[in-house]
């Protein structure tokens, strides 16, 4: 029997995350959860879900008028305003980058290396090449799994230190514990997820979850 997440925690979580509800999302999530799904299909499915998340998460990006000349006449369209950064958390976040670049080909890509200490379940930073100045205007943190929230919080704080004003997190699956952690420590972050699962088990793994996303994306299961 897995531990239940309290009603209060779940209410906080659901009030602070935008869940992408769609039949296609439900189908692709089922493919990801299936332990029999091979690596190549798992990777492709993460890509598809990431593109759907990207479409939703970019809906509020600011635009400016952009005069163009069509084959028929002149008109005024729109272009995105400001610089956009895509920030995958290594290594699992790399599986979401290609989908984001399909939607935002002009975006910059900055990497943050974080791993979870299996004894303490706390994030350990091992790679950060963010510059000291000239931050992007909007940053999208990519991490397929929002579990304890430690890595996402560390990524948020690194981007905040850089000077980024608008920061969004894109996760395939989140849990109330991780969302609550971000709610308490990164109240300005905007969270987008395909599903909010039941919670964490005693080993801090998401239930029902989909296993280790990084291992399944890169075929390093033992």
Image (spheres, rainbow, N blue to C red):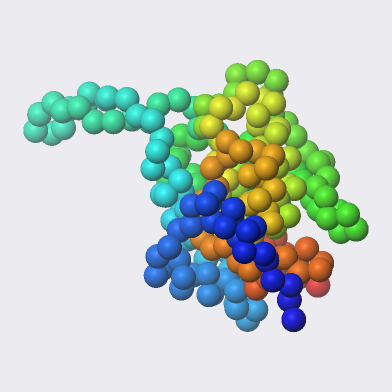
Query: In which image quadrant can residue 147 be found?
Result: bottom right
Looking at the image, the residue that sits furthest to the right is 119
Q: Residue at x 65, y 73 (%)?
A: 208
Vertical position of residue 155 compared to residue 122: above or below: above
Q: Is residue 85 left or right of residue 116?
A: left
Can residue 99 be seen at all in this image of the molecule? no
Looking at the image, the residue that sits furthest to the front is 8
Can residue 75 be seen at all in this image of the molecule? yes
Q: Is residue 50 left or right of residue 70?
A: right
Q: Tell me residue 131's x, y (percent).
A: 69, 24
Which image quadrant: the C terminus?
Answer: bottom right
Q: Is residue 35 left or right of residue 221?
A: left
Q: Residue at x 65, y 29 (%)?
A: 160
Query: In which image quadrant can residue 10 be found?
Result: bottom right
Q: Tell me residue 90's x, y (percent).
A: 71, 48
Which image quadrant: the N terminus?
Answer: bottom right
């Amino acid at each position: 029997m897995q531990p239940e997440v309290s009603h209060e925690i779940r209410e906080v979580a659901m009030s602070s995350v935008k869940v992408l509800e769609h039949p296609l999302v439900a189908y692709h999530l089922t493919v990801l959860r299936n332990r029999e799904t091979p690596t190549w299909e798992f990777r492709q499915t993460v890509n598809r879900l990431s593109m759907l998340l990207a479409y939703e998460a970019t809906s509020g990006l600011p635009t400016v008028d952009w005069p163009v000349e069509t084959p028929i006449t002149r008109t005024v369209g729109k272009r995105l305003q400001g610089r956009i950064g895509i920030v995958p958390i290594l290594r699992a976040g790399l599986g979401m980058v290609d989908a984001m670049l399909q939607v935002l080909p002009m975006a910059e890509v900055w990497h943050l290396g974080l791993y979870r200490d299996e004894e303490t379940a706390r994030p350990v930073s091992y790679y950060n090449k963010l510059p000291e100045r000239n931050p992007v205007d909007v940053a999208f943190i990519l991490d397929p799994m929002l579990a304890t929230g430690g890595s996402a919080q560390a990524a948020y704080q690194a981007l905040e230190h850089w000077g980024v004003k608008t920061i969004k997190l894109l996760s395939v699956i989140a849990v109330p514990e991780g969302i609550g952690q971000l709610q308490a420590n990164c109240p300005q972050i905007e969270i987008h997820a395909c599903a909010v699962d039941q919670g964490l088990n005693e080993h801090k793994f998401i239930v029902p979850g989909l296993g280790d996303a990084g291992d399944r994306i890169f075929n390093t299961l033992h």
